[in-house]
């Protein structure tokens, strides 16, 4: 908590060029892009970073092939371009993955029509992935024996990309990148009210939700990056906007690993929408639903569970059908979809655009970010920089890219040390991958510091949480650098243990209390009980 406390003190005492409200993907990339250009940035969130919609994605980083059906070729073109850049810039995190799509009899498009669309999708993606293929029923079965081909007329195989780690970790690494360039960020800091003073500067009165302390943050420009709460925050500030949101709920269930193959199984659910089984470490993530809801808050219902389980059981020949007892964890996210104010939303949310919108009030020096997808995040960062410059904030040239993994020189140095220390003698069982690869993917250059601590003291390489691969050196680093206020911040967002290990198993872990003691000191027991209380909702 030292870093967080230090940052909160800095928030009180400075005039910032830009204050960003909201630490989801839009706020995180905006902070990283601005800080890289020398802007004095502050970033706050009333929850943890990526604590709402940004932690509930499918982990797919895709060009949006399903949006071709609604003829949004411009959107698909831009998303494919963004996907390619993320794969190129984050090779350890964003990786190409094959999709195997089965088409059932009576579907609105036959496989031969769909392969044409898939080839067009591949061309829009600049031919940067493996080529699509049309598959016969027998070819589908030979590639994935689990698939039920009884009602199939064939299928297609194509490539897209996915996050090898969890989405919230990806978001937090943008926050870290921003802080490394001078951004002052703090989680669990809520904006209570905000106004402009006589000089046009924003005075935002906030509350540290961890201590109850209230104070003001001053900034020349304010950015509303609150995701699903953009409309609500604009009402608080008195800003009138051209756009607002309607909400679509999507849910995923995490179950034991279905297939040993590293591929996404794609089907069309019984309501005609795309439905996936996505690899997640040693588990499978299945879903999603697409349901209009009225509020940014939503929960997984019994109906949702029955829909997902019924569809996956119908599409696969499992030895034993999946039931609710197989569910390890659940994700429930509300997608904020952008519409013009007064526009009637479509009954079918698939007919609504997934485009984002960045709207600027020159008079008020205020920017609102509507919608957005993880795939499109780099474009959001660039657009916010352009809008901030229009508001009179001087931006320095960015030397090289403001995003991406560390240099090849650092990577080679890291893996040479990992090899010398022989840290890959055992797989990290939470992900089924080499420890050196996992540390590099999650922590980048800071993973080198962890290896150096193991070199000085071999005990730092010991596992803390049984069966997780989490080492002592990681927890020591987290204590100092990742502003973990609650145990859920670590288990759900800085790592993905909350998604791949059931709560019952976590509670039986002897090492988890040791982690709590390192993270929270004298408050360890209270934080532990807070996480396991029955009313807690992820």
Image: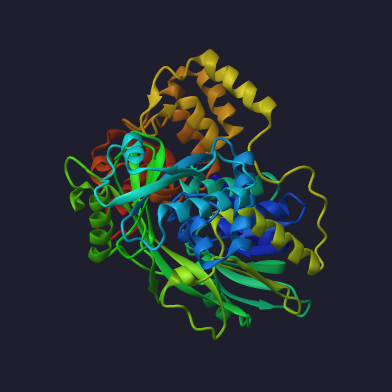
**Among all residues in the image, which is located at the extreme left?**
320
Q: Which quadrant holds residue 203?
A: bottom right
Residue 160 percent location from the top left of the image: 51, 45
Q: Nearer the viewer, residue 114 or 401?
A: 114
- How is the protein colored in the picture? rainbow
Residue 23 percent location from the top left of the image: 55, 58
Residue 156 percent location from the top left of the image: 43, 46
Is 447 placed left or right of 315 in the picture?
right
**Among all residues in the image, which is located at the extreme bottom?**
342
Name the residue at 41% across, 36% down: 262
Is 300 placed left or right of 407 in the picture?
left
Q: Which quadrant holds residue 373?
A: bottom right
Position of residue 469 relative to residue 315, above or below, is above
Position of residue 370 relative to residue 342, above or below, is above
Position of residue 307 relative to residue 241, above or below, is above
Residue 300 percent location from the top left of the image: 30, 62
Q: Nearer the viewer, residue 314 or 538?
A: 314
Is 341 placed left or right of 424 in the picture?
right
Name the residue at 61% across, 83% down: 238
Position of residue 433 relative to residue 519, above or below, is above
Name the residue at 54% across, 86% down: 342
Q: Nearer the viewer, residue 321 or 388?
A: 321
Q: Work out whether residue 8 can be spotted.
A: no
Q: Work out whether residue 302 can be spotted.
A: yes
Which quadrant does the C terminus fall into?
bottom left
Q: How many marks?
A: 0
């Amino acid at each position: 908590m030292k870093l967080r406390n230090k940052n909160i003190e800095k928030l009180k005492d400075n005039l910032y060029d830009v204050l960003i409200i909201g630490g989801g993907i839009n706020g995180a990339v905006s902070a990283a892009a601005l800080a890289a250009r020398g802007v004095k940035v502050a970033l706050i969130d009333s929850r943890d970073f990526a604590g709402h919609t940004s932690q509930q994605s499918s982990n797919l980083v895709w060009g949006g092939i399903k949006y071709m059906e609604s003829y949004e070729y411009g959107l698909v073109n831009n998303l494919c371009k963004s996907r390619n850049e993320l794969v190129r810039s984050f090779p350890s995190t964003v990786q190409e993955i094959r999709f195997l799509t089965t088409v059932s009899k009576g579907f609105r498009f036959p496989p031969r029509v769909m392969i044409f669309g898939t080839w067009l999708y591949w061309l829009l993606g600049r031919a940067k992935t493996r080529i699509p293929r049309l598959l016969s029923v027998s070819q589908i079965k030979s590639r994935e024996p689990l698939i039920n081909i009884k009602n199939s007329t064939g299928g297609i195989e194509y490539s897209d990309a996915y996050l090898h780690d969890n989405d919230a970790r990806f978001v937090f690494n943008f926050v870290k990148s921003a802080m490394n360039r001078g951004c002052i960020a703090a989680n669990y800091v809520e904006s209570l009210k905000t106004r402009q003073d006589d000089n046009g500067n924003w005075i935002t009165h906030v509350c540290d939700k961890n201590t109850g302390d209230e104070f003001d943050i001053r900034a020349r420009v304010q950015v509303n990056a609150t995701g699903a709460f953009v409309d609500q925050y604009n009402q608080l500030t008195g800003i009138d906007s051209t756009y607002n949101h309607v909400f679509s709920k999507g849910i995923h269930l995490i179950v034991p690993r279905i297939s040993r193959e590293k591929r996404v199984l794609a089907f069309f659910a019984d309501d005609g929408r795309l439905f996936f089984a996505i690899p997640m470490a040693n588990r499978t993530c299945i879903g999603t639903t697409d349901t209009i809801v009225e509020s940014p808050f939503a929960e997984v219902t019994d109906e949702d569970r029955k829909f997902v389980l019924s569809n996956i059981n119908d599409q696969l020949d499992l030895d034993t059908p999946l039931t609710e007892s197989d569910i390890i964890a659940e994700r429930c996210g509300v997608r904020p979809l952008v519409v013009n104010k007064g526009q009637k939303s479509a009954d079918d949310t698939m007919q609504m655009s997934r485009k984002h919108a960045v709207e600027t009030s020159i008079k008020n020096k205020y920017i609102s970010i509507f919608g957005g997808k993880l795939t499109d995040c780099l474009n959001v960062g660039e657009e916010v920089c352009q809008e901030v410059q229009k508001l009179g904030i001087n931006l320095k040239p960015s030397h090289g890219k403001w995003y991406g993994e560390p240099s090849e020189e650092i990577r080679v140095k890291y893996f040479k040390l990992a090899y010398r220390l022989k840290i890959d003698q055992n797989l990290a069982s939470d992900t089924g991958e080499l420890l050196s690869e996992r540390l590099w993917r999650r922590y980048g250059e800071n993973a080198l510091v962890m290896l150096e601590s193991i070199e000085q003291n071999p005990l730092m390489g010991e596992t803390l949480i049984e069966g997780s691969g989490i080492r002592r050196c990681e927890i020591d680093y987290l204590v100092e650098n990742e502003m973990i206020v609650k145990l859920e911040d670590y288990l759900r967002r800085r790592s993905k243990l909350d998604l791949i290990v059931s709560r019952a198993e976590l509670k039986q872990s002897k090492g988890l209390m040791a982690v709590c003691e390192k993270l929270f000191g004298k408050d360890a027991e209270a934080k532990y009980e807070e996480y396991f209380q029955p009313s807690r909702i992820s």
